[in-house]
Image (tube, rainbow, N blue to C red):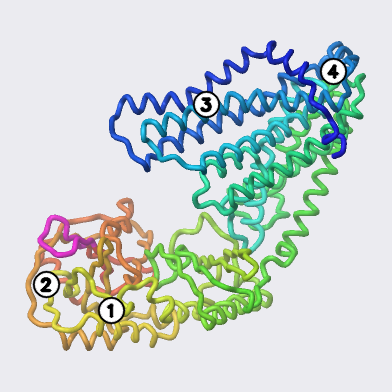
Amino acid sequence: MKLLFTSRINFDLIGFHAKRLKAFMTVFTILLLTTFPLPIFINWLNSSATSTLNPFPQFLVSLLATVTVFISAISPFLFFNYLFSSKSVNIYHSLPVRRRDLYITYLFASLMMVVIPFTITYGLGYILSYILNIIPMSIEHLFIYARLVIIFAAIMSMTIFVIMNTGTLSDAIIYTVILSIAPYIAYTAVQFFAGRFILGFASGSGEMLALFSPHIATFHVTNSLGVEYSPTIISSYWLILGIIINAVSIYLYQIRKSEKTEQPFTNRVFFSLITSLFTALLLVGLIAFWAILTNVNHFLSPFVIILPILLCYVIYVLLNIIKNRSTRNIREITRNYGIVVLVTIVTCAFIFISNGYGFTTRVPHVENVERIKISGSTVAQLPFGEGSTKDIFITSDQGINNFVAFHQSIVNDFEKDASVLSYSDIFTEPGQSPYALLKFSYNLDNGSQMNREFFVRKDKLDPLFSMMHTSETLIQINPLSRPRFNPTAMQIFNNTLTAEHEFTGNFAELGTIYTNDLRNIDSIQDYTQDGGKLEYIVMYQKNAEIYQLNVDQRFPGTLAYLNANTGKKTDVNLNYFLAKPKTDIVIPRFFNPEYGFMSTNALSFLNYDTVTLSNLSRAEALTYETAVTAADYTNELHNILYVESIGQDTLIPFSIAIPLK
């Protein structure tokens, strides 16, 4: 670090290279101008309409940053290329300039080669946008500029680090590319491996990549909406990391032996370390990927590891052949690869056997939990929530206590019986698996988040059923249970939607009674029992959202209330269809409409490869009055009555699929 901060920039050398490389700077500037100012001007000429919320400049800044990332990666080669020629090294090192001063001078020159064209382009682009009133003036644009410059400097430091460890241009380019893609391979390998072999692991969103790859950090800085880490934190992180990398690089330059120039590597440790780590990460990712494709859940299965080991062996040998410039030492290369494979397999096997060092069975303390989010994908897999996409949030003390206790019970049962949890299976047909997805996250009082994604045996989900029907959760997912909720439209139909009932009751009372019926159902088994003949279909709408309630014998209070508060029937004539199974493939279950109903999605539950759809008249639809049921929770084949109101005179547009017994 001392070498870095005691070095001096030689401006005479910078002036010399500025004249020598001014053509490159001109080309870079013209290239960048085509990404930001020029498209703004052309777009303005083509359209007189402007808006202060125009997203076009933001897209162009991202494009500008992307091109500048590439320039940042290659810029150091323009100044440090003398290190790849013995003759040039001797000339430069004979100059009355210390090595550390040469380093800092060319680091600064490389940065200027990028910053000057970028500053011209970025400034002109925003000035033009302000003048044309495309976007309003904002101090944030200056902050974005400063953050981007820091990221570009970090990208250069990675390239320079590679140059300091290599002796030829070709090797420097190859390993600059390897270091650039290594974070993506590492992240993908971890996601694939943990997602396949560690029970409970929840796939990440990729936000953390911004801390491992400055290339990704560029996009987080230019588009900070919805990202986990603050752009200021990301840029500060890369500023510190860039300084550290340059401190290491300037030290390596100080001890670099001139006689190793034009050899593939001036630092043998660099080649061995980078190649071994890269191969190990690639091996882990390929093993997990192959396990997913072959549907094998055991990490040590020969079907999983043999092919990835052979593929990585080829890559490892190729990297060594490029380094050695020959096919000699194959035996030594194979031995070294064997060591890499052994260490990788043993490490991953221990992680697999220990369930990620106890990751699977770790449960937070109740007092440390501030909020719990249950994913909408989990709700959609439960029998009372099929079709839902809403996340559920639990913040009450009682709710948090109940859920943490439920989580702990799942873990305890798993420790006694491993079949309680399963690995994800991409080949399982919908509705056929005995497991349901349980995906949730804890927000802890220290600001961190704990994510889990289990495939839990369905017979263990009864506690979750009762948690989904508390006042706290119901008001989030069913507007009927919200106090003082008034729909903008409401219609009550008979079970075949061939007649509409006049409603003489109170909607708030109906909601209260229906909610009480839900709470009186103790378990999923009780909920999925045969409720007998479907009696009423209640359709109601609030703004653009359309909801549906199927009422049968499982909801005695609701049924009694509707019997007492519905008046005369009015015949309706909608579009009716009968769907019949073509094959012995079971038609997917139909979601219970407790969680809402999207008016255009019912037909998507019918697969034209497995059913035949035929038109019905109103009279024919009416004949199924004794056969319709509220929902089907079995794997039996059945016909379906499909009804839609498109093109008909109804208050609420809808399409409904109803199982026929």
Mark toward the start of the polypeptide (4 vs 3)? 3
Q: Which residue is mark 2?
A: 499
Three-letter residue code for mark 3: Thr
Label of residue 484 in the image: 1
- Quarter of the image with the C terminus in it: bottom left
Q: Alpha-carbon distance for marks 2 and 3?
A: 67 Å
Instruction: Give me the residue at 36% from left, 82% from top.
Output: 518
Q: Alpha-carbon distance for marks 1 and 2?
A: 28 Å
Q: Which residue is mark 3?
A: 121
Element class at badge 1: loop
Instruction: Give me the residue at 43% from left, 23% from top.
Output: 38
Q: Alpha-carbon distance for marks 4 and 3?
A: 38 Å
Q: Within 10 angstroms of label 3, few (less than 14), some, or many (20 or more) residues?
A: many
Q: Alpha-carbon distance for marks 1 and 4?
A: 80 Å
Three-letter residue code for mark 2: Ala
Mark toward the start of the polypeptide (2 vs 4)? 4
Query: Would you say residue 654 sits in the magenta stretch?
Result: yes
Magenta stretch bounds: 643-655
Q: Nearer the viewer, mark 1 or mark 4?
A: 1
Mark toward the start of the polypeptide (1 vs 4)? 4
Three-letter residue code for mark 4: Glu
Q: Nearer the viewer, mark 4 or mark 3?
A: 3
> On the image, which quarter does residue 593 sit in?
bottom left
Element class at badge 3: helix
Element class at badge 2: strand
Three-letter residue code for mark 1: Arg
Name the foreground residue: 33 vs 463: 33
Residue 383 in percent (x, y) is at 41, 72
Label of residue 262 in the image: 4
